[in-house]
Structures are given as structure tokens and as C-alpha cells.
């Protein structure tokens, strides 16, 4: 069966939305993990008897969750740029693409590599989460 370029654009959109559904599930797991990190940090803070091993374990957990969030953001951006690259390649063959595909292409950076560096807002958000969690873990209750 030969696939026409019109069908190819539909396939690109289908793969994109399937991946975005998976990314939504991963985001839900990440949000739940951040909540668990807050609960663990709060538990350590409220218990004046937490030992150093518990504090280290909570810190490692919270740092891992922050890394997972960074990776989630990086992968989502990389995927969106990859879809834009697919549209750019389709357009380069002389095939016209839909206005929505063109908007997606214009708003993305098709050649961008995967990077874990967050944008300033993402960085501030993760930093604020870590500051709250780590201060609760390592500060003593007065």
C-alpha cells in the first residue's frame, strides 16, 4: 500500500498525539512524585528524631524527582521539535502542509538537540520545589 503525502501528515499528527498522551501520563506520575517528596520532607521536618540516613534518602529521592521533571520537559520539547522536523522534511519534498502543521513548524526548532537545560521559568519552578523540600528535610524544627 502506497502512502500519499496527505496520509503522511495524518500519520505524523497521529504519532505526535499518541506520544503526547504518554507524556501526559508521565507528567501525572511526576506530579505525584513531587507530592510524595513534599510529604517525605514534611515528615522528616515534623519528626525531630530523623537520622542522617533518612535525610539523605529523602534528599536523593527529591533530587531524582527533579531530574525526572527536567527529563520530562526536555523529552517533550525534543518530541515537539522532532514532529516539526518531520513537517519540514515533508514540506521540503514539495508537498504542501496544512496551516496547523505550518504553525507547528514555525513555533518549533526542528534542528534542536535534546537538552536537559530548562528555560528560566522551568528552572525557577524546579528550584523552588527543591528549596522547599530540602529546607524541610535539613532544617530542625524550633
Image: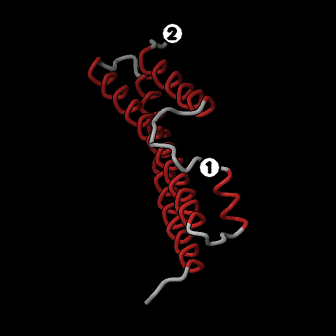
**Badge 1 vs badge 2, beta-carbon distance below 8 Å:** no
| Residue beneath disc 2 | 142
Q: Considering the image in quadrants, where does the N terminus appear?
A: bottom left
Location of residue 132 with respect to 77 vertically, above or below: above
Residue 96 found in image quarter: bottom right
Neighbour class for label 2 at 10 Å: few (<14), some, many (≥20)?
few
Location of residue 109 with respect to 95 vertically, above or below: above
Task: Name the residue at the right extreme.
Answer: 99
Element type where label 1 sits in the image: loop
Question: Residue 25: x percent and y percent?
Answer: 48, 57
Task: Name the residue at the bottom extreme.
Answer: 1
Mark found first going from the N terminus, 1 or 2: 1
Residue at horizontal 46 percent and vertical 50 percent from the top: 29
Location of residue 31 with respect to 63 vertically, above or below: below
Q: Count the numbered circles shown.
A: 2
Is 67 in front, or is 110?
A: 110
Q: Is residue 52 left or right of 78 when viewed as pictured?
A: left
Element type where label 2 sits in the image: loop
Q: Is residue 141 left or right of 96 when viewed as pictured?
A: left
Is 60 in front, or is 39?
A: 60
Question: Residue 86: x percent and y percent?
Answer: 52, 62
Residue at horizontal 46 percent and vertical 48 percent from the top: 75
| Residue beneath disc 1 | 108
Dot in front, 1 or 2:
1
Amino acid at each position: 500500500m502506497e502512502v500519499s503525502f496527505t496520509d503522511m501528515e495524518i500519520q505524523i499528527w497521529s504519532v505526535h498525539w499518541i506520544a503526547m498522551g504518554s507524556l501526559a501520563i508521565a507528567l501525572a506520575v511526576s506530579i505525584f512524585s513531587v507530592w510524595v517528596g513534599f510529604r517525605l520532607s514534611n515528615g522528616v521536618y515534623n519528626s525531630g528524631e530523623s537520622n542522617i540516613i533518612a535525610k539523605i534518602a529523602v534528599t536523593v529521592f527529591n533530587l531524582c524527582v527533579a531530574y525526572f521533571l527536567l527529563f520530562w520537559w526536555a523529552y517533550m520539547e525534543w518530541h515537539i521539535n522532532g514532529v516539526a522536523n518531520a513537517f519540514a522534511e515533508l514540506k521540503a519534498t514539495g508537498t504542501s502542509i496544512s496551516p496547523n502543521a505550518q504553525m507547528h513548524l514555525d513555533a518549533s526548532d526542528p534542528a534542536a538537540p535534546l537538552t536537559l537545560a530548562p528555560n528560566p521559568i522551568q528552572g525557577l519552578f524546579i528550584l523552588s520545589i527543591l528549596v522547599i523540600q530540602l529546607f524541610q528535610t535539613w532544617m530542625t524544627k524550633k
